[in-house]
Image (cartoon, helix red, strand yellow):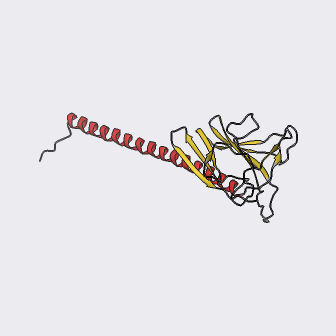
């Protein structure tokens, strides 16, 4: 019984098939890695945005009716929404909040904090005290990266949206001064194009 060996043509065909399978496998594997990387970036982006909004919600939930004197010895209300910050030590949204509780549930001193958009970043500003010493400057932290636009507006007691807020002279239906707006809305547009809008209800106290 004769035995037939593998011809050169058959060997070349087998090698060609193996090469095609290898290329297809490489492309499929590369596509899997690329998809996973994109999913990781998207997941990180939405996680960071969620944490940022959660931070603001927590801060607004701790609002304190405590006006302050700024570093220029000018009175500022407990809650202030500027249309445009004027200098590097100002924020678009500025307010007083209660201090954080420590491990023994003792409350730390109240804080003066603010938020603003600068150079593609939403920044958190924390001042060293409430009534500030001359030339006092806030510490600045990056709260959210990759932000193209950020717009704020405040809802007044007449249910009208306002681009700014600082007047404490307005009265509500009980003839009590309105310190805080009824609600605050923040819309941000990421550099990747997505727009996220969140509205925060705010409790007013006399």
162 and 20: which is toward the camera: 162
Name of the residue lying farthest toward the left: 1
Name of the residue lying farthest toward the right: 133
- State which quadrant residue 30 falls in: top left
Residue 169 x %, y % = 75, 49
166 and 47: which is toward the camera: 166
Quarter of the figure that contains the C terminus: bottom right
| 78 lies above or below 23 | below
Q: Is residue 69 visible?
A: yes
Identify the residue at image location x=51%, y=46%. Answer: 42
Residue 182 x %, y % = 65, 54
Q: Can residue 55 be seen in this view?
A: no
Residue 11 x %, y % = 24, 37
Residue 58 x %, y % = 67, 56
| 142 lies above or below 171 | above
Q: In this view, does 41 lie to the left or right of 167?
A: left
185 and 168: which is toward the camera: 168
Q: How many marks?
A: 0
């Amino acid at each position: 019984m004769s035995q037939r060996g593998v011809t050169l043509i058959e060997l070349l065909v087998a090698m060609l098939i193996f090469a095609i399978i290898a290329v297809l496998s490489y492309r499929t594997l590369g596509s899997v890695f690329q998809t996973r990387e994109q999913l990781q970036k998207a997941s990180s982006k939405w996680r960071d945005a969620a944490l940022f909004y959660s931070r603001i919600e927590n801060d607004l939930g701790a609002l304190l009716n405590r006006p302050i004197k700024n570093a220029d010895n000018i009175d500022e209300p407990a809650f202030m929404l500027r249309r445009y910050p004027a200098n590097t030590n100002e924020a678009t949204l500025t307010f007083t909040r209660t201090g954080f509780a420590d491990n023994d549930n003792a409350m730390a001193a109240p804080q003066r904090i603010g938020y603003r958009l600068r150079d593609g970043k939403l920044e958190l500003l924390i001042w060293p005290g409430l009534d500030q010493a001359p030339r006092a400057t806030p510490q600045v932290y990056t709260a959210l990266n990759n932000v193209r636009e950020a717009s704020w507006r405040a809802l007044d007691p007449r249910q009208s949206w306002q681009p700014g807020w600082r007047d404490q002279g307005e009265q509500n239906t009980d003839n009590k001064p309105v310190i805080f707006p009824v609600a605050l809305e923040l819309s941000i547009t990421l550099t990747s194009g997505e727009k996220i809008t969140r509205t925060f209800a705010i409790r007013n106290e006399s």
